[in-house]
Amino acid sequence: MSKRIPGVLRIPSVGEPAPDFEATDVDGRAIVLSRQPKPIALVFLRHLA
Amino acid sequence: MHLVQLHRFLYEQRIVAPVLAMSFAPVERLASWISLVLDEEMPREWRAHTRFVPDPSLRIYHAYGLGRNSRLRVYGPRVLLYYALRWLRGHGIPKVSEDPLQRGGDFVVDAGGRIALSHVGVDQADRPPVQRIVAALQSSSGS
């Protein structure tokens, strides 16, 4: 079952389609998740220390 | 550091897996952190298949449900213990430039584009064991 943060945000659960996104990496290269080789790990960092 | 542990494990086990490392720091700050901090802790060859993605608008974080944590959880016992151990080892307490309440998380997307692992910690020190991430990567290659 999906976990919901009251108000807005929703954490995708196992088995659900991964939210796609487009971005630009730190070297200026375009990234589209759906076009990346898979399986792939997504690590969302917290603050940088 | 979780990111270093994951890459060390992948490298030592000779597992080739792409990784996207997202940060909500601006691109200049992320690039600086990579060269000043990460390069000291992780050989570049460990992260040959890793790309670093700045997301200062939090657009991608929010797409994956990652908002802000509560102060009580951010500064809970496990986090305080982590910083205490850091201090005892002589690493000091890191200066925080970004929002310390913003949550992080770990996901694995399988070959079919579906979530194979979803982990958002109960506090800022809660990350899944790297073995669990790698197991999800390996078990989802044929999905």
Image (spheres, rainbow, N blue to C red):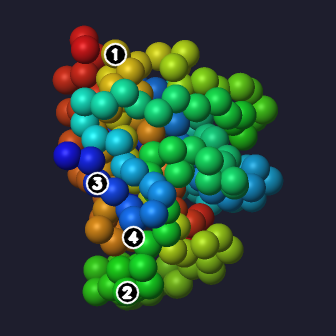
Residue occupied by mark 2: B72
Residue occupied by mark 1: B112
Rounded to the nearest angstrom, the CA distance separating label 2 from label 4 is: 10 Å
Query: Is residue B11 something one can see in this rendering?
Result: no
Q: Give whichever of B29, A18 is nearer the camera.
A: A18
Mark linked to residue A3? 3
Instruction: Please say if the residues under marks 3 and 1 sit with CB atoms less than 8 Å apart.
Output: no
Q: Earlier in the sequence, mark 1 or mark 2?
A: 2
Residue B96 location, quadrant: bottom right
Q: Give whichever of B11, B131 is nearer the camera.
A: B131
Circle 3 Cα neighbour tier, 10 Å, few/some/many (<14 / 14–19 / ≥20): few
Q: Earlier in the sequence, mark 4 or mark 1?
A: 1
For the C terminus of chain B, the quadrant is top left
Mark linked to residue B124? 4
Task: Give the amino acid at mark 1.
Answer: Gly
| SS of the residue under disc 2 | helix
In the rendered image, residues at marks 3 and 1 fall on the same chain: no
